[in-house]
Amino acid sequence: MTVILLRHGRSSANTAATLAGRTPGIGLDEVGREQSARVRDRLAGLPLSAIVTSPLQRCRETVAGLAADFTLDAQVEDRLAEVDYGDWTGRPIKELLSEPLWKVVQQQPSAVVFPGGEGLAGVQARAVAAVRDHDRALREDGEDDRLWVACTHGDVIKSVLADALGLHLDSFQRIMTVPAAISVISYTDTRPVVHHMNDTGSDLSGLARLAGAGRTAQTVPGGETGTA
């Protein structure tokens, strides 16, 4: 099985440089809506079997058109929600830079628990469990040829990628994911395989060849040839 991790398009909070967190009513801005349309074009023609989304508005708006294109219902998954930043929610980023905890977020995120919110280790645990649970459910549904989309948030995606890459959570700040970027992971019987990270423009039609290979996909000694 192969999951296409999609970060939501640019939101009004992104442009305002505030930490939106779980603040209600944060939707896509004009650029974010354009990014969402480009995502639809990039994924058109792929055999998508499911779309799962964070409950927050900016994610639901990002996948609404995609779900319509594929005549799929976007399934809301609470475990893919944004980090609960607690007392930091809604504050300007430039203000948070002076907080002592900010350095810990950058250097040892596994130790971070946001005041009045949740810890990043807990975020990774719930997000990885959600992705693996949905992946397993599709596998148990009887077919291997499944590509599916999970639309969520930057720190959530970075934590899932760190797990797939076998990195400690303290390394997740080395991973970048921008609005509307796509990352791709296949979950095999033995380990995850990462195919794309923070991809905003490449041709994704080759993902169709991963369909059916999710449980048995192998990496080739010496590197892939690039052939379909």
Image (spheres, rainbow, N blue to C red):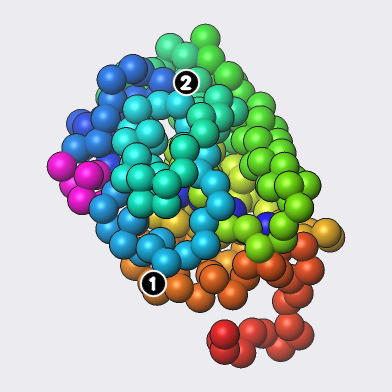
Which residue corresponds to mark 1? 202
Range shown magenta: 30-35
Q: Residue at x 36, y 45 (%)?
A: 68
Q: Local crowd at mark 2 within 10 Å, few (<14), some, or many (≥20)?
A: many
Quadrant in which the N terminus appears: bottom right
The residue at which mark 2 appears reads as 85
Disc 1, SS: loop
Q: Is residue 223 above or below residue 45?
A: below
Q: Position of residue 189 (x, y in %)?
A: 83, 59
Q: Is residue 15 above or below residue 22?
A: below
Measured as percent of width and height from the top left, residue 109 is found at 59, 35
- Image spot of residue 41 (x, y percent): 31, 62
Q: Is residue 218 visible?
A: yes
Gap between marks 2 and 1 measured at Cα:
33 Å
Q: Nearer the viewer, mark 2 or mark 1?
A: 1
Q: Secondary structure at mark 2?
A: loop
> Which amino acid lies under the numbered mark 2 shown in the image of this protein?
Tyr
Q: Residue at x 45, y 73 (%)?
A: 205
Residue 225: where, in percent of width, then height? 61, 90
